[in-house]
Amino acid sequence: MASENSPLLAYRLLGDEGFTAPAIGPGGPGAASTRKLSTFLGVVVPTVLSMFSIVVFLRIGFVVGHAGLLQALAMLLVAYFILALTVLSVCAIATNGAVRGGGAYFMISRTLGPEVGGSIGLMFYLANVCGCAVSLLGLVEAMLDTFGTDSTGSSELRVLPQGYGWSLLYGSLLLGLVGGVCTLGAGLYARASFLTFLLVSGSLFSVLVSFVAVRPRDILLAPQPGPNGSSLPPHVGHFTGFNSSTLKANLGAGYAKDYTTGAMMTFASVFAVLFNGCTGIMAGANMSGELKDPSRAIPLGTIVAVAYTFFIYTLLFFLSSFTCDRILLQEYYGFFGAISLWSPLVLIGVYATSLSASMSSLIGASRILHALAQDDLFGVILAPAKVVTRGGNPWGAVLYSWGLVQLVLLAGKLNTLAAVVTVFYLVAYAAVDLSCLSLEWASAPNFRPTFSLFSWHTCLLGVASCLLMMFLISPGAAGGSLLLMGLLCALLTARGGPSSWGYVSQALLFHQVRKYLLRLDVRKEHVKFWRPQLLLLVGNPRGALPLLRLANQLKKGGLYVLGHVTLGDLDCLPSDPVQPQYGAWLSLVDRAQVKAFVDLTLSPSVRQGAQHLLQISGLGGMKPNTLVLGFYDDATPQDHFLTDPAFSEPADGTQEGGSPALSTLFPPPRAPGSPRALSPQDYVATVADALKMNKNVVLARACGALPPERLSRGSGSTSQPHHVDVWPLNLLRPRGGPGYVDVCGLFLLQMATILGMVPAWHSARLRIFLCLGPREAPGAAEGRLRALLSQLRIRAEVQEVVWGEGAGSGEPEEEEGDFVNGGWGDAEAEALACSANALVQAQQGQGRGGGPGGPEGRDVEEGPTTALTFLYLPRPPADPARYTRYLALMEILSHDLGPTLLIHGVTPVTCTDL
C-alpha cells in the first residue's frame, strides 16, 4: 500500500529507556528547528489582524449606517456562521495527523488529490498575492488622504506628492519593507506582527474608551457633489453620546447612495463589504510549517481569533448605533478619528492593520508556493521557490511572491480585484469543507480527529454557504474562478501527479461500491439483464494478448477478471510469491487498455488453482459466470509483446522513472516441445469442473490470427466486409430434430450478438447456419429460427446446409453426450468430426485446405471472409478416461478454421419480454 509518510515506522524502542520520536516537518530531518512559533504568535495574532484588516476602522459606520443595527448584526452572524463552518472543518483536518507546510493547500491536496489540491492551492496563492497588493495600495491611499499634497483632510503635513508614479513608488517601498521582514524568517515576522497587534489593540481600546469619554459633538462633513457638477452645502453629523433615541433611529435599515462611489447600496452590497473584511481565517493555518504543534495550535488559535474578532465587531456595532446618527455613519467612513480622544492613534491603527494584512498575505503566499514547489506539481516554473536557508526559511518563495506582488502593484488601483480575491478565498474555504466532508463520508478508519465538534452536515452546509457567497459577491468572478479551477485541474491531470498521497476519492469509491454490492442481490437477478462476467485464465500474457483483448470485447460491461495460477505450495515457501506479481499484472491491464481486474492464486496444480479462482473470484453479485480458456493444441506460442505497439519499450529494459520494463516481468513464451504446466487430461477436467459449477465455458483457438483493427477500440471499419459465423447446433450430433436450438445454442447467439455491438465489429455481418438431415424438408427449420431471431431482436442471415456424407448418417439418434461418451467407435467419431470440420470450412469465405478430412486445393469465389467462428462445444465425457480422446475430437472439429470460439452455455441468457 502506497504511503507518503508513515511516522510510526520511525519510532525505535530503546529498551527500558523508552522511545524517541522523529521530527516531522516539511524540510526533512532538520526541519524541526524551523518550528518555533507558539499558538498565540503563530495563529492568534495573524488571524486576528487578517480578520480585522482595514474594515474595523473604516467600514463599521458604513455597515451600520446603511443596514441598521438589526440587519448589521444579522449580516455579522451570517458571515461568522459561514466562517465558523469552515473553521470546524479546518480544526477536524488539522487534528487528524501531522500537518506540514502549506496550510490549506496541504490539507486539500492530501485529501482531494494533487489535481484539485494543486489548482486550488495555486488560486489561494494568487489570492494572497493580490490581497497583499490590495492591502498595500489601501495603505498608500490612506496615507495620501492624510499627508498627500492634494488631500482635503485637516492635516497640516500635506507633504507627499501624488500621482500614479508616486503611488507606485510608495507601494514599492512599503512592499520592500514587508518583503524584508518576511525574507528574514517567521521569527521576525511573528515579532513584527505582535508589534502591530499591540498597536491595533491600543488603537481599538482608545476608540472604545472614546465612545464613553467623549462628550456629544457636531462633526462637519465634507461637501457632497450635486447636480451639474456643483457641490452641495456642507452638512453636519452628530455624535450624541449614549442616547436611546439615536439607537431607535439606527435600528432599521436606511440604504442610500454611497458618498464615495454614488452607487445605491443594498443588503447584498453592504454584506459583501463586511464579508470581504473578515475572510482571513486561514492566516494562522498558512503558518503550519513554522508552528511548534500545528495540530493543536491551528484549531485552538483559530477559534480564539474568530471569537475575539466577533466580540469586537459586535461591540463596535452596538456602540456606533447608540452614539452616532445615521448621517455621520453613512457619510464619514473615518468617524472613529473624529470622536477619538487622540485621533492620531486611530490613524496608527489604520496603518498598522493594513501593514499587518500585507505581511500576513505575503508570508502566507510564500509558504503555499513553497509547498507547491516541493510537490513539483507545476514543474520547473516554480523551481526557484524550493530554495531555503539553512534554518529552513523559504526565502526563494518569498522573493518569487514579492516579484509577483510588484507586478500587481503596476496595475494601480485594484478595487475591481478585491472581489476576485475574496472569491478565491471562498473557493479555498469551500475546498477545505469538501475535504472534510469527503473524509467523513468515506468513513475511513484512520480519519479520527481529536476535534469532534463537526459533522458531515456542517461540512456540507459550509460548502453550500461558500458557493452561495461567491455568487452573491461577484457572479462573474465566481464563474471565472470555477472555470480557472477546471482548467488547472485538467492541466494537472494531463501532467500526472504523485500517487502516494492517499486520495479520498478511492475511499469514497470503496464506500459506495461496498454499499451497492450489498444491494446487488443475486436473488433478484433476471435473465433480461444478464451479461457475461468473464474469468480468463492466462498462463503467460505474452502469448495471450489477442485473446485478452477479445475477451474484453465480449464482456459487454460485465465483470472481467484475469486469472493466473502460480504453481507451488505455501508450506514449502518462505513467503507468498503471488503478492509481488500483482504490480506487473496491473501494468499489463493498463498497457493493454482493457477493463479488467486481476486475481492470482498459488496452487499445487493448475486445475486446483482454476477451481479456487472459479469459487472465490468476485464478490456478491459480481462473480464470474463464464470461464474463458485458450485452446489446448500444438501451435507454437507467439510473443505478442514484440509486435504490439502498446508494448514497445526502450532497449535498456527500463521504463520512465527507472522502473523495470513490462517485458522483463513475464517469462518468455514456452519453447516448442517443452513440458507444459497443464496436461491434456487436466485441461478437459478443468472444463468439466466449470460446467459442474454451473459456469459457461469458452475455448478460444487461433485468436492471434485476428487482425489488429478487430481488437482495437476504434470503429473497425474496413474496406472488405467480414462475416461472423455461428453454428448453434452440436455438429457432433446434428440430428437433434429440425431446427433444434437448445440453451447452449441460444448462448452462442447471444455471445455473437454481443460481439457485434462492439464498434470494432460493427461492419461484420452475422451468419447463422442450420444443419438439415437427409430426410428433412428445407425451409421449415429456417422459418422457425427466423421467428425466434425476430423475437430476440437479432439481425442475422440464416443459411440451411445439408449434412453431407458424414459417417453414421443412417444411425439412430443418440442422446447428447453419447457420441463423446463412447457410444460410437473411435474411427466413426473421427470421421464425423472431420466431416463437420469440412462442412464448416465449405461455408467460410476462403478455403483452408489441409485439415483432416478437409478438401484441398479448392477454388473459392472472391467475397467476404469469415473473421470469427462460433462453434457449439459438446460436454466433456462422464468418463475421465476419455478426456484425451474428447480433446482430440475438438482439435479435429476446429482445425484450420481460423479464429474460433467453442462455447458451451449452461444458463439461460435470452429474453423476449420487455
Image: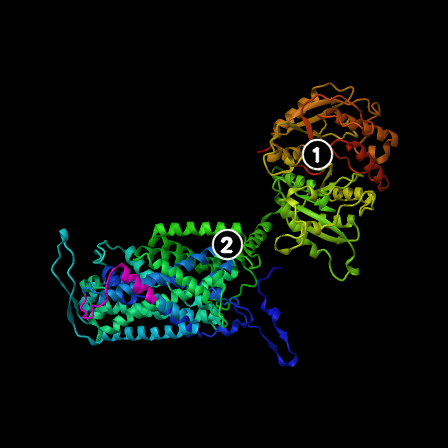
Indicate the colouring scheme: rainbow
Near-viewer residue (610 or 161): 161
Q: Residue 99, image x and y in percent?
A: 50, 67
- 273 to 199, vertically: above or below: above
Left-right relation of 463 to 265: right
Near-viewer residue (339 or 458): 339
Task: Determine the residue positioned at 85% across, 37% down.
Answer: 885
Q: Is residue 618 in view?
A: no
Q: Residue 637, image x and y in percent?
A: 76, 42
Q: Is residue 850 in view?
A: yes
Q: Residue 887, image x and y in percent?
A: 81, 38
- Residue 115's label in the rendered image is 2
Quadrant containing the N terminus in the rendered view: bottom right
Task: Determine the residue positioned at 16% across, 63% down.
Answer: 222
Q: Is residue 173 magenta?
A: yes
- 902 to 200, vertically: above or below: above
In terms of sequence position, does the residue under pointer 2 or pointer 1 come before the other? 2
Q: Secondary structure at mark 1?
A: helix
The residues tagged by marks 2 and 1 sit, at their Cα atoms, a distance apart of 50 Å
Q: Is residue 631 magenta?
A: no
Q: Amino acid at mark 2?
A: Glu
Mark 1 neighbour density, 10 Å: few (under 14) some (14–19) many (20 or more): some
**Which region is colored magenta?**
153-174
Residue found at the far left of this picture: 233
From the image, tell me which residue sits under label 1: 743
Q: Secondary structure at mark 2?
A: helix
Which label sits in the foreground, 2 or 1? 2
Near-viewer residue (171 or 903): 171
**For residue 208, what is the image quadrant?**
bottom left
Left-right relation of 813 to 367: right
Q: Amino acid at mark 1?
A: Val
